[in-house]
Image (cartoon, grey):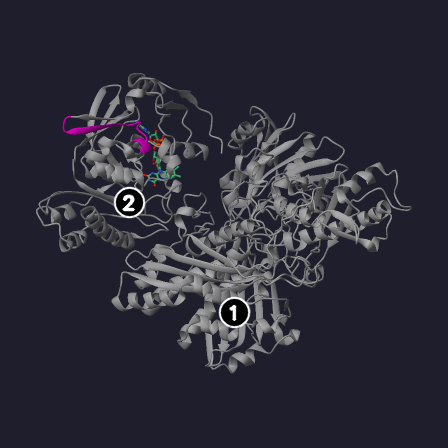
């Protein structure tokens, strides 16, 4: 379990990181928490010649408010995201999903940005970022640009980040006071999701004013369950409505098949878990 | 004086070895380094069956730090054939088993080339520069396909994939009736087929081996369960004189049978160190451990059971296919045979026939894994008992009670000819029932069924016994096993009164140091702290049969007690001389000899000092109290127990959650209740893991797709319930301590208890079996009448999935 040899750089600013990455060319890789990258290197499934470690770039860490938005630095660890008060108050769905990632060791090293850039269809954070309408702030040699989550996730493990671009931060519109739950289905506690559903609901006077539903591992990219959202908005938050809405959960998805489930099973899970997530969000 | 008032045996002492094991401040093999140490790395076949047409090692030879690049062709004359110590039948087919493939590879992961370099990193880099051409051959992976006519052959030269057929028939053996007649006359006849999936032992410390050839004796350190067996096998396999080899198993981080092996890596490190004249070390990666350390289980079981309409069993017929993998390793062929005597379990079965066909496939070898043959047998019979109860519409506990051996009937000779020395199944079951609230849970189950609850409740029962404490040499001999089953121990009384205990059984996490110290402290009347236990080095512990089959306490510790008896006998002579009395006038208690009826006496530690000085010993008495003993018991030990599991099944998702788990085990007398509790907990976790979580899956090419812990799912504490454990104590009558083995009990009993609970929860939906592991997908498939494919080329999610992303 020894990686191939590589060069190593540890920039201290975003600008320096971008420059180092650009100079190193195609075979460079960014290192964030290393929880996904290191196993790949150690199993020699990849052999980048240059590793650019973002671990000492302070401006990439932390959560801050920016008007109607939250800005989460790409290098903020899962542990810090999950217990951050701003995240708890304004994007509780992100906190709920982050709490389910792996185990405490992994959460202390793995990062929010790393998970999104990694774009694992079974990862828990892409779907909730998508559901809340996150926008990715990325920086490359030609400057900064913003990519809406819907355009960011392209395919299995593939994003619209260029090889010489860094994910710098994630902007998330505030969902203050929304009721959230992330219902994750896996086989052992520290495993990835077979299917998971994140819901965030704005309920006022018993009526659902806003609904965001994201599905994990129901396609090669995270999916927003638009049909479920539409079936909820404007309705009363009663059990029948929630149950009926959940029936739409698998619409428009294209789940894969592996030893843990085929498309039909995953579709069933999506419906069941959506129903449960909605009920828990509203109930508690 | 050093007398201990309160007995040590029976105390829940924390293990004295734990601090160093848990903090890692100890010698694991991989921690050991020597001047000039070289490192070995292995290139392994990515394909499961192929001819090697060429290997180009030139580029690797000139890589930095590389001292040697070696292929199978280079070692063909030296490497011999890896040993198989158990020829179960005279005509068993046992093809040559090279440590490194010479011209053909027969499973994915087989070694094809090795590099020795100055650092491990350089060795691994050089592996990438080796170019191997394979001419791929078709593979055979499925046992039923392997025994069919015209099957692809693993070893062309054998002309068959069948290694051996082993049969036991109670009519032929004269131990019972004719099973075919019983079945023909059966009022009820049930036939079932069960699958024992392949498991990966997944010990915590990956295997590691270091060989130093620079002394007069070659020294080999290995993370092994069997240092003594390894030394002998190195001599037999490689033709090196046994007295020129020393084997050391330093602290070893778990084994579960997975390190009961003589491995290709041990042979290769030995050969390369000898060739280069320098110490060489190899430590496997976790991926190598998963793919190439031997696997466990893997059987297809067909059972036919006959009974009368009142539920009395009249006959049992068992037909097994057992997957050997591509070769026979140390005890591969004997593992299913160890189960042959356990299908009748705790029941009075009048007629029995067992037959097992051992089958070659293009997969890594199977061999011992916690329970070794007995979990498989217990699973099958306990599932059958539930099926019989369901068929007759009676409570599954009642059907067991009807057929089990009652406590008045011990000693009881079974239909296999084994004599169970003691047991009390009624007592253990009664206690378990009460702890479980059996009647209350049955009521809740009925209510949930009635309401059509989304979450259904099932209750699973497993009663069990096992033959363990592997020994009697005589019995092992009758099974054509290649070695005996005795164990050796020695006690050294040091001049200062401290005690060294030398044991031939080789701990790898069990807690021998603590338990042996407790036993010896009581026996010799010295403080617990004054006892040191030495093990795992053929130089200090020169004789032994090592640790497996729950044998350490029931065989190894009895040898310690026998040695202790001899120490006391020697000391008695000297005490009599010192106290000027007859030996018969001496009482020995709490470390002190006292002259009966007087206040005169002397302590055993004082005698130790007097022996050291040797100034005044009786005539003809050697100046030594040190003693050794070798113990070979007359019989196995037969622990038993009753395990009850309540499982909730979510019918919408198929998820199984264990709601309550109660086990009452009878392991005879207990030396250290805390250690027993730990063994039971760990065993339960492993047995439950077989029922619900673990499975080694291969794709259609023979590649292991569950090759990391992201795909091969070991449960953690978060995935298991809080266990309720308790005991009854029926002493064994075959050893002086009254002890029985506990190392495998939890693993043996828990798997059927859980699966029975899962099936019970959905039986009213017309389901009578779900294959292991009972994953959510499988359970959901069963409920919804769908055949689900959980094998195939892709394991689910996890680290496996990252392969796609980052290439
Ligand atoms: C045992 C285990 C269990 C896990 N379980 C789960 C789980 O249940 N759910 C879950 O969601 N995840 C799980 N993970 C993955 C974990 O969340 C990782 O932290 C995450 O996938 C990657 O984050 P990282 O910071 O470690 O990124 P790294 O591993 O450092 O990087 C991952 C990839 O993203 C790229 N990258 C990282 N940061 C940036 C950036 N700022 N800009 C551009 N590219 C970047 C890297 O170059 C690399 O290709 C698990 C991991 C482990 C080891």
Is residue A76 covered in magenta?
yes
Distance, label 2 to label 1, CA atoms, is 50 Å
Give the secondary structure at mark 1: helix
Residue that label 2 marks: A217
| Residue at image coords 42%, 64% | B460
Q: In this view, does A216 lie above or below A56?
A: below
Tally the marks.
2
Q: Which chain carries label 2?
A: A
Pick the front one: A187 or A24:
A187
Span colored in magenta: A67-80
Is residue A175 covered in magenta?
no
Is residue B75 left or right of B18 when viewed as pictured?
right
Pick the front one: B475 or B38:
B475
Q: In this view, does B583 lie above or below A74?
A: below
Labels 2, 1: one chain? no
Q: Report crowding for label 1: few under 14, some 14 to 19, many 20 or more residues within 10 A (C-alpha).
A: some
């Amino acid at each position: 379990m020894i990686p191939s040899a590589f060069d190593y750089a540890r920039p201290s600013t975003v600008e320096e990181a971008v420059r180092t990455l650009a100079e190193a060319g195609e075979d460079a890789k960014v290192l964030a928490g290393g929880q996904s990258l290191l196993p790949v290197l150690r199993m020699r499934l990849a052999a980048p010649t240059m590793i650019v470690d973002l671990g000492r770039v302070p401006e990439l860490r932390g959560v801050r408010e920016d008007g109607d938005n939250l800005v989460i630095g790409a290098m903020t660890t899962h542990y810090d995201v999950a217990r951050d008060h701003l995240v708890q108050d304004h994007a509780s769905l992100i906190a709920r999903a982050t709490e389910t990632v792996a185990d405490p060791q992994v959460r202390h090293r793995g990062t929010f940005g790393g998970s999104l850039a990694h774009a694992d269809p079974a990862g828990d954070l892409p779907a909730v970022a998508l559901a809340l309408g996150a926008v990715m702030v990325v920086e490359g040699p030609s400057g900064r640009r913003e990519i809406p989550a819907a355009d960011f996730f392209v395919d299995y493990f593939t994003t619209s980040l260029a090889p010489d671009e860094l994910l710098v931060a994630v902007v998330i519109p505030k969902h203050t006071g929304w009721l959230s739950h992330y219902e994750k289905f896996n086989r052992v506690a520290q495993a990835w999701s077979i299917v998971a559903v994140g819901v965030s609901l704005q309920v006022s006077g018993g009526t659902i004013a806003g609904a965001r539903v994201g599905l994990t591992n129901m396609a090669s990219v995270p999916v927003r369950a638009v049909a479920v959202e539409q079936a909820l908005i404007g309705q009363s938050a009663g059990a029948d409505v929630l149950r009926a809405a959940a029936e739409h959960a698998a619409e428009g998805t294209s789940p894969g098949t592996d030893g843990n489930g085929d498309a039909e099973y995953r579709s069933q899970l999506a419906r069941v878990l959506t129903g449960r997530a909605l009920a828990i969000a509203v109930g508690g | 004086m050093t007398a201990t008032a309160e007995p040590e045996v029976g105390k829940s002492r924390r293990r004295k070895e734990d601090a160093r094991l848990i903090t890692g401040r100890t010698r694991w093999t991989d921690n050991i380094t020597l001047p000039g140490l070289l490192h070995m790395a292995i290139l392994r076949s990515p394909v499961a069956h192929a001819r090697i047409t060429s290997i180009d090692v030139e580029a690797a030879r000139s890589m930095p730090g590389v001292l040697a690049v070696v292929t199978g062709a280079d070692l063909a004359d030296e490497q011999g054939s890896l040993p198989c110590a158990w020829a179960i039948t005279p005509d068993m087919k046992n093809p040559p088993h090279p440590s490194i493939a010479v011209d053909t590879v027969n499973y994915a992961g087989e070694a094809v080339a090795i590099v020795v370099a100055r650092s491990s990193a350089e060795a691994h880099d050089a592996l990438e520069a080796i170019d191997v051409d394979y001419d791929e051959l078709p593979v055979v992976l499925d046992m039923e396909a392997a025994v069919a006519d015209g099957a692809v052959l693993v070893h062309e030269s054998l002309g068959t994939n069948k290694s051996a057929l082993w049969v036991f028939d109670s009519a032929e053996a004269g131990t019972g009736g004719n099973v075919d007649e019983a079945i023909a006359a059966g009022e009820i006849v049930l036939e079932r087929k069960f699958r024992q999936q392949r498991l990966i032992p997944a010990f915590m410390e990956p295997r590691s081996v270091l060989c130093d050839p620079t002394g007069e004796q070659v020294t080999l350190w290995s993370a092994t369960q069997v240092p003594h067996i390894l030394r002998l096998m190195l001599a037999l396999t490689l033709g090196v004189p046994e007295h020129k080899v020393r084997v050391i198993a330093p602290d070893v981080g778990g084994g579960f049978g997975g390190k009961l092996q003589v491995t290709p890596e041990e042979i290769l490190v030995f050969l390369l160190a000898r060739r280069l004249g320098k110490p060489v070390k190899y430590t496997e990666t976790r991926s190598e451990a998963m793919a190439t350390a031997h696997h466990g289980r893997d059987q297809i079981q067909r059972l036919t059971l006959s009974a009368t309409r009142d539920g009395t069993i009249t006959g049992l017929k068992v037909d097994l296919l057992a997957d050997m993998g591509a070769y026979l390793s140390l005890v591969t062929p004997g593992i299913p045979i160890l189960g042959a005597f356990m299908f009748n379990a705790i029941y009075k079965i009048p007629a029995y026939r067992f037959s097992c066909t051992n089958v070659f496939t293009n997969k890594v070898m199977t061999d011992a894994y916690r329970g070794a043959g007995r979990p498989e047998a217990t699973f099958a019979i306990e599932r059958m008992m539930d099926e019989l109860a369901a068929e007759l519409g009676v409570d599954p506990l009642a059907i067991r009670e009807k057929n089990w051996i009652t406590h008045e009937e011990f000693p009881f000779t079974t239909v296999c000819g084994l004599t169970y020395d003691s047991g009390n199944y009624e007592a253990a079951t009664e206690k378990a029932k009460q702890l479980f609230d059996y009647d209350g849970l049955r009521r809740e189950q009925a209510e949930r069924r009635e309401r059509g609850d989304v979450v259904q409740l099932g209750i699973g029962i497993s009663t069990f016994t096992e033959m363990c404490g592997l020994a009697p040499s005589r019995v092992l001999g009758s099974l054509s096993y290649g070695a005996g089953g005795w164990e050796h121990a020695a006690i050294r009384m040091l001049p200062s009164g401290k005690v060294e205990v030398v044991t031939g059984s080789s701990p790898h996490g069990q807690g021998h140091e603590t338990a042996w110290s407790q036993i010896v402290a009581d026996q010799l009347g010295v403080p617990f702290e004054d006892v040191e236990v030495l093990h795992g080095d053929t130089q200090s512990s020169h004789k032994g049969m090592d640790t497996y089959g729950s044998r350490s306490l029931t065989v190894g510790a009895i040898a310690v007690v026998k040695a202790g008896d001899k120490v006391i006998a020697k000391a008695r002579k000297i005490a009599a001389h010192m106290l000027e009395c007859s030996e018969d006038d001496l009482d020995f208690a709490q470390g002190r000899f006292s002259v009966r009826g007087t206040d005169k006496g002397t302590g055993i530690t004082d005698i130790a000092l007097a022996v050291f000085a040797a100034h005044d010993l009786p005539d003809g008495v050697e100046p030594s109290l040190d003693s050794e003993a070798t113990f070979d018991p007359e019989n196995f030990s037969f622990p038993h127990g009753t395990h009850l599991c309540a499982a909730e099944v979510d019918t919408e998702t198929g998820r199984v959650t264990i709601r309550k788990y109660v086990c009452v085990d009878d392991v005879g007398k207990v030396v250290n209740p805390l250690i027993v509790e730990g063994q039971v907990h760990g065993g339960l976790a492993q047995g439950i893991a077989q029922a619900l979580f673990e499975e080694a899956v291969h794709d259609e090419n023979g590649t292991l797709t569950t090759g990391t812990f992201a795909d091969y799912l070991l449960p953690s504490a978060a995935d298991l319930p809080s266990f309720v454990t308790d005991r009854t104590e029926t002493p064994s009558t075959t050893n002086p301590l009254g002890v029985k083995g506990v190392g495998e009990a939890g693993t043996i009993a828990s798997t059927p208890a859980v699966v029975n609970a899962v099936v019970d929860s959905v039986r009213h939906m017309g389901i009578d079996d779900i294959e292991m592991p009972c994953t959510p997908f499988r359970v959901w498939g069963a409920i919804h009448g769908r055949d689900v494919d959980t094998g195939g080329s892709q394991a689910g999610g996890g680290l496996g999935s990252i392969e796609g992303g980052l290439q």
